[in-house]
Image: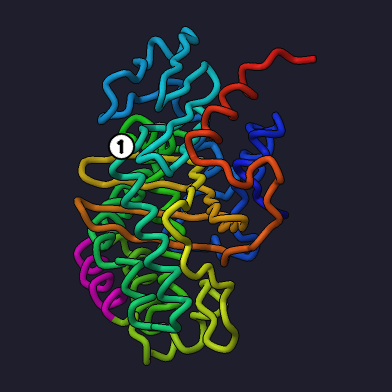
Amino acid sequence: MAKKILAAALALVMCASLAACGDKKEDKDNSSKASKTSDSSKADVQTTSDETAPDETTSDETTADEDKAGAPVNNDTTFQTAEVTMKLINNNIIYIDENNLETRPTNEEVQAAIDAIFKQYKAAEDKDKQAFLDTFSFDILKEPMAELCDISFKYDNDHSDEEFQQYLASTNQTTKYAVVDDVIGLLEKLGDSDVNDKLSDAMEAKDGAKIRELLNKLTDSVKPDAEAVKTNLDTATIFNSKEDIQKMGDLGDDVIYGFFLEYSGKYEDQLYMRLTFSVLAGDKEYDLGGVETWSVGDDFGVYLTNQAEEVDMEEDMKGMSAKQIFEAMKLQMTAPEE
């Protein structure tokens, strides 16, 4: 399915089509050994909070209380209603969310996520296996993964899954848990199988110290010449050693990015996001589908679940600047229904 983020918005079906675009890669393995929730419970990330956190870098954002009251914002860079927030960032990023996030990223964090996305995609285009593996930044998630294991152990026997989910929501870790669970699933495919088995045993024994030791070994085992990487990299990621990936090439100076944020959560110095992503360059449009990103401090990791799909750009979009598209989308979203 073509994920025409910006064009769909202009066609007055933005919210419905963008929400549908968020489906993750269907064959993604969700049987992580650390998992306590099903895919359906992960989807509840979108509804864990009725409040919208203001953008930390934009002084004219409304507060959460104003959002709940439906107070609109409409200026040169922000359009916000009770249902949706849209921003124009750096004059070339059209950012959209549906006011259902745990927390909202700053403009700088949105730009950093885009940079990480293209770093991973470029490494896949160049068939640079080491550079590609480096973009996952598995190392920065070792302690967050161990911490989530510690939390899950406390809720294993004496508490219900609902209590576990409530604790995650109350500490702003729902999105963190969902994203980290997927990262652990990816590590199971790319990491050393013997270490994976030992890690499973340590989790069964609820041995936090051993888990930390084995997570170090597991992340260190993800190397270009490792057997698990040779066997599973092509099927577990967008990296394809046998065929060329869809190349986006030189996008030019007028490139526009469509950034639809499905889930976002901050915990301490960590940021976790799920989003769908589109690129407009000249008369071409590329949709990258689902993306997960994580950061600790200034270090970013990213997991692209689909290669770019070149789709036909709507005629009305051709030749438009990001500012023109932003203004057109505002008009469409405020137009009275016929």
Q: Residue furthest right?
A: 338
Q: In this view, does 140 lie above or below 322?
A: below
Q: Where is residue 4 in the image (x, y as percent from the top left)?
A: 65, 47
Point out the image quarter for the N terminus: bottom right
Q: Is residue 188 above or below residue 52?
A: below
Q: Position of residue 262 (x, y in %)?
A: 51, 40
Q: Position of residue 21 (x, y in %)?
A: 63, 46
Magenta highlight on residue 200: no
Q: Is residue 26 above or below residue 156?
A: below
Which of 135 and 14 lies nearest the eye of the viewer? 14
Quick one: SS at disc 1? loop
User: Do we see residue 228 in this rendering?
Assistant: yes
Which of 100 and 323 lies nearest the eye of the viewer? 323
Which of 285 and 149 lies nearest the eye of the viewer? 285
Q: Mark 1 points at which residue?
A: 106
User: Do we see residue 161 in this rendering?
Assistant: no
Point out the image quarter for the C terminus: top right
* Highlighted range, magenta: 208-220
Which of 104 and 334 lies nearest the eye of the viewer? 334
Residue under the image location 70 percent in, 46 percent down: 314
Residue under the image location 50 percent in, 35 percent down: 96
Mark 1 residue type? Thr
Mark 1 crowdedness (10 Å alpha carbons): few <14, some 14-19, many ≥20: some
Give the left or right position of residue 218, taking residue 297 as reference: right
Q: Is the magenta stretch mostly helix, strand or loop?
A: helix
Give the left or right position of residue 98, taking residue 164 as reference: right
Q: Is residue 203 above or below residue 111?
A: below
* Quarter location, residue 74: top left
* Quarter location, residue 315: top right
* Quarter location, residue 62: top left
